Image (spheres, grey):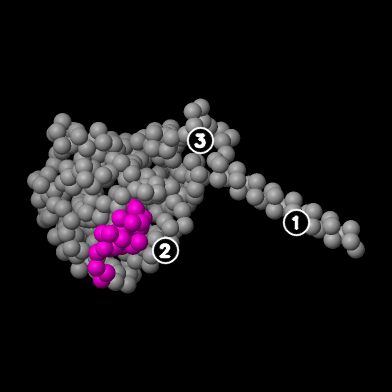
Amino acid sequence: MISGPRPPTDAARMGLDPCCETTPSPPAPETPADDSGAARGGFWGEGGLVRSLSGKVGGWFSAPERDLAARARDVATLTERHPGCDADLARRFLAARGDRLDDASSMIEKHLAWRAENLPVSPDEPAVRAELERGVFRRCGADAQGRPVLLFAANKNKTAERNVDDVIRMMCYVIEEAIASVKERNAPATKGVAESGEPSAASPGAKAEGAEAEGAVEDADKFSLILFAPYGTELDIALVSALASTFQDNYPERLHRLYALPTGILTRVMWEGVRPFLSAGTAAKVVLTSGGHRPREIEAPLTIETLREALCDLDPQPEGTDPWAPGYVSPSDSESGEEERSSSEEERESSESSSGEE
């Protein structure tokens, strides 16, 4: 079975998880869990999300750049040491462990044992099929540069109705399918790279030089995640903890961006509590969207087709209203504009009145 939640590792307590690019982050305070407080505040409530993720989210994010020749040597060492470990997997786990060879080797050994025990996952398994039908986690198209986009509809998850192992198994199936599509799409660009140990445009840390050299897509081998958690969404700490642990240990260096929506003042306050425990590079990958039915922060990086597929069922509109149609103005933006115009008119009238009195 896929392991459930477990205590944070020493590396997590020290701020040395894969998200920490080279500088260790300060340790997270040892705060006793308080599920009742988390429940009162919902998904984003009263520190529950901070405690669940502050030491764990980094496994999906990028690690620091390193001398390519030195990394290539370590990649070759890892592939020789671990049958079944290819160069791409070695690069990811090496980056996830800050280029510490022995730590990466230990991580790979555990990962290969996990894969042998838990993969492949079939969508025909009754528990997996049931979780897929609930629609809590699924793929919904691609971003503007072709990376897969996954959707975590947290509002659909109900603690009383789910089994953590079943949900994690279903999520692994969805991610494995997304990874397979990435490999197929990038195959022409990465042909021959697997044996060389040299990173390509689709490898951890690989970046296009200048302005997207020769059309290369940075982080082409990663995916983006939309987290939809409206007000009132239940914070399932057991699931969040199991998800973070499983994916950090087995899918490092896979997340390109995380788009959280809808967000408000409480979300941003909670984010400020999480941010100090993350490196600047990691924090930059988390996008808190603005209010309204058409968050402007996701219009450019995600395609309209993907946004419709991901959000229209989760965020229903009045009949005949399409928030992704050209020229649409969300109610919040409209009200904000009216307030600005009203304020401007009052200032002008006040100025004209003052001029008349003079």
Left or right? Give the position of 305 relative to 53: right
Marks 1/3 in contact by CB < 8 Å: the verdict is: no
Identify the element where label 2 is drawn: helix
Identify the element where label 1 is drawn: helix
Position in image of residue 214 (x %, y %): 44, 43
- Label 1 or label 2, whichever lies nearer to me, is 1
Which residue is the site of mark 1?
347
The numbered mark at residue 272 is 2
Position in image of residue 163 (x %, y %): 17, 45
The vertical placement of 146 against 108, above or below, is above
Identify the element where label 3 is drawn: loop
Q: How many marks?
A: 3
Q: In the figure, residue 26 lies in which quadrant?
A: bottom left
Asked whether the viewer can see residue 188, the reply is no
Counting residues from the start of the chain, the first of labels 2 and 3 encountered is 2
The vertical placement of 17 against 233, above or below, is below
- Label 1 or label 3, whichever lies nearer to me, is 1
Left or right? Give the position of 56 relative to 7: right
Counting residues from the start of the chain, the first of labels 1 and 2 encountered is 2
| Residue drawn at point x = 40 percent, y = 60 percent | 271
- Label 1 to label 3, Cα distance in Å? 33 Å
**Residue type, label 1:** Glu
**Residue type, label 3:** Pro
Marks 2/3 in contact by CB < 8 Å: the verdict is: no
Left or right? Give the position of 340 relative to 148: right
- Label 2 to label 3, Cα distance in Å? 29 Å
